[in-house]
Amino acid sequence: MTIPSLADLHALEPAQQPTYADRAAVDSAVSRLQGMPPLVFAGECDNLREKLAAVADGKAFLLQGGDCAETFDGVTAENVRNKLRVLLSMAVVLTYAASVPVVKLGRMAGQYAKPRSSDNETRDGVTLPAYRGDAVNGFAFTPETRRHDPQRLVEVYHASAATLNLTRAFVTGGYADLRQMHEWNTDFVRTSPVGQRYERIGAEIDRALAFMEACGANPDEFHTVDFHSSHEALLLEYEHAMTRIDSRTEKPYDVSGHFLWIGERTRQLDGAHVELLSKVSNPIGVKLGPTTSPDDAIALAERLDPDRIPGRLTFITRMGAGKIRDRLPELVEKVTASGVRAAWVCDPMHGNTFETENGFKTREFDDVIDEVRGFFEVHRSLGTWPGGMHVELTGDDVTECVGGGAALSAADLSHRYESVVDPRLNRAQSLELAFLVSEMLSQ
Ligand code: PEP
Ligand code: MN
C-alpha cells in the first residue's frame, strides 16, 4: 500500500486546515515530526482492532471518552489521572452491571485539533481567527495567539507522548487494579448519591474478588487494563508525518494514536481525510450526522474497508436526540443489508449542543440520555448490536452540561465552565450515564 504524498492530499483541497503564512516553518515542523519515534506501535493498533471486531460482532461494548479538546496546559498528572479514573469507573459499572466486556478507549493523548463552523470569531467588534485547538493556535483572544503556528504540531507530539506515558504507567502500574476501585472515588462517595451507588457495586466486587482469590484465581485482568488512545485525524501535516511503514507487516500505520476518526465535516468521499485513512491499517472511525444517507455510509465503508477486515471500521452516529429514532433505522438497516460489518457507536453529544440565554454552549443531560436510549431502541428493534458510546467528559467537577442528578441549571454554568470548545459531562454526570447505559445493556 503506498501512502499519498502531502502534496497529493493538499491537491484534494482538504477542509478545516490551518492557513500557515510561513511555508519553511511548516516544512521544518513536518521534518521534525517525521524524525520522532512512534507514539503507539502497530501491534497495539492490531490488538485494539481485534477488540473492536468483538464490538462489531455483538460481544463487547466500546467506551470512548475524553475532552472535546485537550489543551497543552491540561497535560498534568492530576488532569490525566482524573480522566482515567472516571473512564475506569464507568467501565467497571458497565462491565459489572451488564456483564459485557468493555473496550476502553481514551479520547486523549492527541485530541488537540478542532474543526470549526466559522473561520473567524468576533468579540466587541474585533474579528480574529477562530480557535482551532492547541495544535493550531491559542485560545486567548489576541492576534498573536490566534495566528496559526506550525511549531504547535511538534508540541502536540510532546503533549501526546507525556499523556500516553503517564497513562501507560497508570493502567499497568497498579492504579487500575480492581481492588483500587474504592480509592478512585473516596472523596466523591461522601458527597454524591451516584458515588454511593458506585460504592455499593464496589463492595459487591470486593466480595467477588475475595471469593475468587480464595478459590486460587487471581488473573492479570484484575490488576491491569487495556487502554488505548484516539483522536480526530484532522490536521494532514501532522497525521501524514506520523504515518510510517511498520517493519513487521510492511503496512502503513498512523502512529499518532491507536484509533483515528474522521469528523462529520471532513468525511467527503473524495476528500483528503478519507484518502489518507483509507491507506493506514489502524482501526478507524467515521462520524455520521443526521444528513448521512445509507448510500453515503456504504460508499465510505467501500473506500475505507474494502476488504471488510473485522474491527477495522466503526461508525459513530451523532444524530441528536430528536432525530435518532427517525434517521438511524434506515441507515443501520441498509448498511447492514449491504454486507458491511462496522461497529455502531453512539455519540450522544454533538447532535445536542445549544446555547443558553446567558451565553454558554451546553448540552442537556436528559437529551444525552435520550439519544443513547434511542440508539438502543433502534438497534434492538433491528436485531443489530448497540456497540458503544463516544462521550465528551472530564474527571473534574465542572459545570458545563445542564441537568443530571445534581440538576445543574443554566445559572450554575458560570461556576466552573472550563472547556475551550464543547461542554463535557462532569464526573457525576459521567457515572450516572454509565449506570443508565448499564441498565439499557442488560435489558
Ligand atoms: C468532535 O468530536 O468534537 C466533533 C467536532 O464532532 P463531529 O465531527 O461529530 O461534529
Ligand atoms: Mn466536541
Image (cartoon, rainbow, N blue to C red):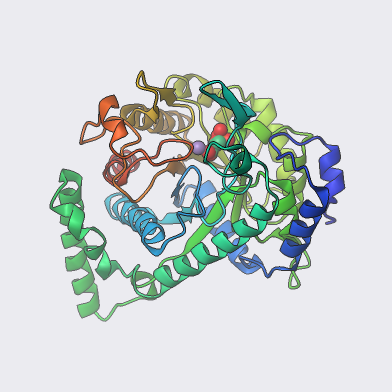
> Is 318 on the left or on the right of 40, as rendered?
left
> Is 272 on the left or on the right of 217, as rendered?
right
Task: Name the foreground residue: 159 vs 126.
Answer: 126
Which residue sits at x=74%, y=50%? 237
Tell me residue 38's x, y (percent). 66, 67
Tell me residue 275's x, y (percent). 77, 43
Task: Name the foreground residue: 410 vs 342.
Answer: 410
User: In the picture, residue 45 is in which quadrant?
Assistant: bottom right
Which residue sits at x=64%, y=53%? 152
> Is 325 on the left or on the right of 299, as rendered?
left
Which residue sits at x=48%, y=30%? 382
Task: Name the foreground residue: 37 vs 60.
Answer: 37
| Observer able to see residue 276 | yes
Q: How many labels does the image show?
A: 0
User: In the picture, residue 401 is in which quadrant?
Assistant: top left
User: Looking at the rendering, in which quadrant would you find the N terminus?
Assistant: bottom right
Q: Quadrant of ligand 1?
A: top right
Task: Name the foreground residue: 183 vs 61.
Answer: 183
Q: In this view, does 366 lie above or below 4?
A: above
Residue most toward the left? 190
User: Looking at the rendering, in which quadrant would you find the C terminus?
Assistant: top left
Residue most toward the bottom? 216
Tell me residue 309's x, y (percent). 67, 52
Tell me residue 173's x, y (percent). 39, 75
| Observer able to see residue 117 | no
Which residue sits at x=57%, y=25%? 126
